[in-house]
Amino acid sequence: MAVLSLFLAWRIKHKNEDAVWLWGMSVVCEIWFAFSWLLDQLPKLCPINRVTDLNVLKDKFETPTPNNPTGKSDLPGIDVYVSTADPEKEPPLVTANTILSILAADYPVEKLACYVSDDGGALLTFEAMAEAASFANIWVPFCRKHDIEPRNPESYFNLKRDPYKNKVKSDFVKDRRRVKREYDEFKVRINGLPESIRRRSDAYHAREEIKAMKLQRQNRDDEPVESVKIPKATWMADGTHWPGTWMNPSSEHSRGDHAGIIQVMLKPPSDEPLLGTAEDTKLIDLTDVDIRLPMLVYVSREKRPGYDHNKKAGAMNALVRASAIMSNGPFILNLDCDHYIYNSQALREGMCFMMDRGGDRLCYVQFPQRFEGIDPSDRYANHNTVFFDVNMRALDGVMGPFYVGTGCLFRRIALYGFDPPRAKEHHPGCCSCCFGRHKKHSSVTNTPEENRALRMGDSDDEEMNLSLFPKKFGNSTFLVDSIPVAEFQGRPLADHPSVKNGRPPGALTIPRELLDASTVAEAISVISCWYEDKTEWGQRIGWIYGSVTEDVVTGYRMHNRGWKSVYCVTKRDAFRGTAPINLTDRLHQVLRWATGSVEIFFSRNNALLASPKMKLLQRIAYLNVGIYPFTSIFLIVYCFLPALSLFSGQFIVQTLNVTFLSYLLTITVTLSILALLEIKWSGIELEEWWRNEQFWLIGGTSAHLAAVLQGLLKVIAGIEISFTLTSKSGGDDVDDEFADLYIVKWTSLMIPPITIMMVNLIAIAVGLSRTIYSVIPQWSRLVGGVFFSFWVLAHLYPFAKGLMGRRGRTPTIVFVWSGLIAITISLLWVAINPPAGTNQIGGSFQFP
Ligand SMILES: O=c1ccn([C@@H]2O[C@H](COP(=O)(O)OP(=O)(O)O[C@H]3O[C@H](CO)[C@@H](O)[C@H](O)[C@H]3O)[C@@H](O)[C@H]2O)c(=O)[nH]1
Ligand SMILES: [Mn+2]
């Protein structure tokens, strides 16, 4: 920081009189870079590491005591939410596998409930989920019997390592073979679903048409028969109409509007273990294996024209309400449809923090996102390790990591907009980060039982006011009654007023008889599209609306109330998902994230407006999230500078003197040391770090600029921003796993980086030829420009590779456009500033 400020001061004082424009542009950019570097560095000042101890959790909650002689688990309930939106981009097989990994998770079955949100309302997804529910009957007990990992069948059966290692049970070989065969059949059924739904629907449709025609003939015997038009529909196997969309939401037959649908696919299990027998399935012997399955519910919220559905945030809020009525787990795990549970103990790991001493002040436990199916060289920095293993982990030492949309375990009352307990006792302002405390052991400890009223609202004195609940949460009394008004360690206390009404609030398990038709009907009413009208859903309650990165805002709101979050890095990855490895898809993903950031920047959720409960460093971290896309403007200018300097024969400084060079050297050396430190601390590799640098420039010059423009359009012209889903590959093609990497799809996002590359290449050529053909070649003048040009090009190398495709098949349009632009710029330059101009050949750019 010291060297940087001295350097900037020197730069400002020492104008390049020969090229003031070049000097001015570069100094402005450098000041911005220094500022954005600070925003990125400061939140890393108090890094910590955390470790969990699952045995302590077991000791405390699952060991027999005099009060609990059987040692029946006393862990709190968890509702798991899985979001999917389009069966074409998100293959139902992928979602089905995720569901199976959740149903098989190592957590007390009666405490676990799984909700699938299908924003497409597609029959295809619905039937795939039903198939998964049925396959779970063999898959889940098999996993329990043989301790299978991971519990996602597709990944498990594709494991490269020896499946028989460490397996002791004698019938493992036989069981595995049988389950594998079942899984293959399951896959065939899932993959055959689109065809069978189409055929079935066509058949029903034809039948209906004939019926209608007959009817018409009977009624009007003498009139000629006209053809009967019946709107096409999707038919379910039992011969009833599917109330959702036709085949899939993006098809021409539907605009995605549909009724609200809830289907309980697996009923809540019995409270006591249900041990299997040898005959339970004719396939494998399940003697002494618990064969119960967690509850599974399919939910598709209602969609109607004229309503803003608020993308994923809207879908999640519908689930929050429906699940409050159906199982009301005090904790909520959120997963994208492609993120499955890779470590069956993951839920317990998260619970370690939630149930720890002081854990009641945690709003969520975020797990790092880990990815599969990425090309070995990770060309576009998809693993994002610098973010997940440096920034997020470091932030854990302040108020906690951001919420990143998936792999996050929430406390339900934090989502409801309540304040953390003991909010008043906490002293804001003081940053309690400390440098000595490097290891925090998380063990589960007793806290004195206390009975706390929960607080809500911006003013500190606003006590809980029950009469305001319907206004905030909407009109469902079921829902309002399910809200705990007092809690202990995330669990509602038994003295909740609604107990008197006969419904156990926040019941850890719902008794079977409670999940009756009226409960489901109530749950359907809270997923209707008008339910949120004039309530605080999306404003202060639940997932927050108004940004395509709903995740960041939602977490921000909680930190803003004084909640803390925790980052849970497990030895064995907790969850794993997929990421787009195609350049275009990746750029669009980065574009969405950056646009979301710009939306946040121009909203009331800008970190500059944060509450005093937000710690300074945390605020800086959030400010950084909102501001980073704007760096693109300066980055693009800076990438053209070396070229401009080559064309003009000028440089950003008047002379390459000792002071300038030693500043440059010191800054480079300190930055390298810093990078080394981060690499050492986080355990990432140098290559990953370098990929991150490269993609920072690629994204910075393309997607981030577009995001700034889009964001400005939204602010100025009110143009809404859509959510472009990233396609998830089915992972089915074994021969060419990374085919996606080589597909070249044109997008206008590519124009700026291509232009930068071309201009820099031409500039090197121009500079080189001018030096060669000049009377007295001044090689030293060339060096600076060429060096920095190469530096820019080195960063853009993965991008260039991406344009080449596999066999160098790049759309000609790419070359035509970029060639044209590059030539125009060069010509323009030559016209303004002829290269042979004598006025510049002086000592202006020489080594001293
Ligand atoms: O209208 C919508 C749009 C999206 N989704 C779901 O949102 C998830 C994320 O979409 P994806 O295209 O996979 O986005 P990614 O860029 O991979 O996701 C990251 O970034 C998003 C914010 O931009 C977060 O919502 C995600 O959780 C986070 O993983 C998927 O499960 C979708 O099914 C919906 O349910 N409804
Ligand atoms: Mn995703």
Image: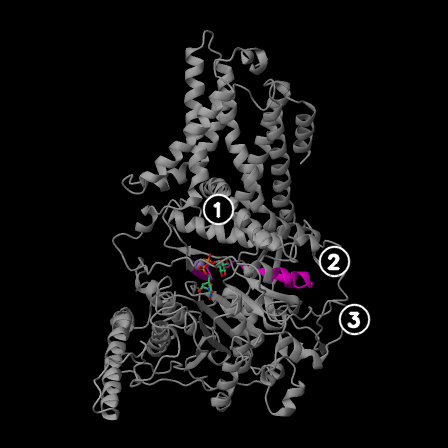
Q: Tell which residue pokes out farthest to the top in this image.
A: 775
Q: Residue beneath label 2, please?
A: 612
Q: Is residue 72 visible?
A: no
Q: Tell which residue pokes out farthest to the front in this image.
A: 222
Where's the C terminus, which quadrant? top right
Residue 236 percent location from the top left of the image = 32, 80
Q: Is residue 398 above or below residue 10?
A: below
Ligand 2 resides in the quarter of the picture at bottom left
Q: Is residue 355 above or below residue 783?
A: below
Where is residue 83, by image quadrant?
A: bottom left
Where is residue 754, by image quadrant?
A: top left
Mark 3, residues whose alpha carbon is within 10 Å: few (<14), some, or many (≥20)?
few
Mark 1, residues whose alpha carbon is within 10 Å: few (<14), some, or many (≥20)?
many
Q: Is residue 846 magenta?
A: no
Callout 1, which amino acid? Ala
Q: Which residues are magenta?
A: 555-576
Q: Residue beneath label 1, please?
A: 703
Q: Residue beneath label 3, please?
A: 461
- Spatial CA span between label 1 and label 2: 33 Å
Residue nearest the viewer, comparing 649 with 338 = 649
